[in-house]
Image (cartoon, rainbow, N blue to C red):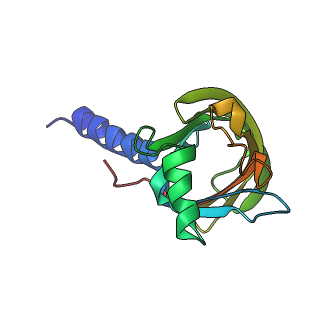
Amino acid sequence: MSWGCICLVLLLSLSAGALAQDKYYTRNGKVFFNCGTSLETIKATNPGASCVLVAATGQFQAAVLMKSFEFDKDLMEQHFNENYVESDKFPKAVYAGHVVDIAAVDFTSPGRYDVGLKGKLTLHGVTREVEAPGEIEVQDGKVLVKVSFRVRLEDYGITRPGVVRDKIAEVAEVKVDMELQPMAGRP
């Protein structure tokens, strides 16, 4: 093998490694929501959200299985899955978009950055634009992502029956907390 071929193979190997480092992921992200009122506490947590972030472009995609939300009361969880989000028919929610100001984030050194996310949320079979403020923190080779936004239930075809209308808020407060790892060595 010639010296030129060896250099080309080494260059391609290093480039592939750099590209792998450019992506961060998790399968253990946390999504919290609160849609209770003063009459009823309705909160849930999902500890199994998946997410991928491409550092160079800011491309961001997250998905969560609706049946994985955990409630304090089993009956609330059942009603959530059967009557509101219809988890058998619409098993997951997906957010696909990008970090608006990704160029301001230095993924090579520790730091905290206020960012914005812009993309589309698909929930209950409906897709709508969602913009949200967030924070990215680079720490010990990990990327911590925190985002908060509001979801108007009616916008996604989720109805609040008259009997419980006063107990369920019109707008759910959603918080996302993810610790992303480098995707190096992943397929």
Q: How many marks?
A: 0
Looking at the picture, tell me which residue is in the foreground, 18 or 63: 63
Q: Is residue 34 visible?
A: yes
Q: Is residue 100 visible?
A: no
Q: Residue at x 78, y 49 (%)?
A: 169
- Left/right placement of residue 155 relative to residue 86 reads right
Q: Residue at x 78, y 52 (%)?
A: 113
- Quadrant of the image for the N terminus? top left
Q: In the image, is residue 180 above or below residue 8?
A: below
In x, y percent, where is residue 156? 64, 32
Q: In the image, is residue 172 above or below residue 47?
A: above
Q: In the image, is residue 86 above or below residue 131?
A: below
In x, y percent, where is residue 99? 68, 38
Choose top left, top right, bottom left or bottom right for residue 120. top right
Q: In the image, is residue 124 above or below residue 33?
A: above
Choose top left, top right, bottom left or bottom right for residue 152. top right
In x, y percent, where is residue 15? 40, 40
Looking at the picture, tell me which residue is in the foreground, 47 or 103: 47
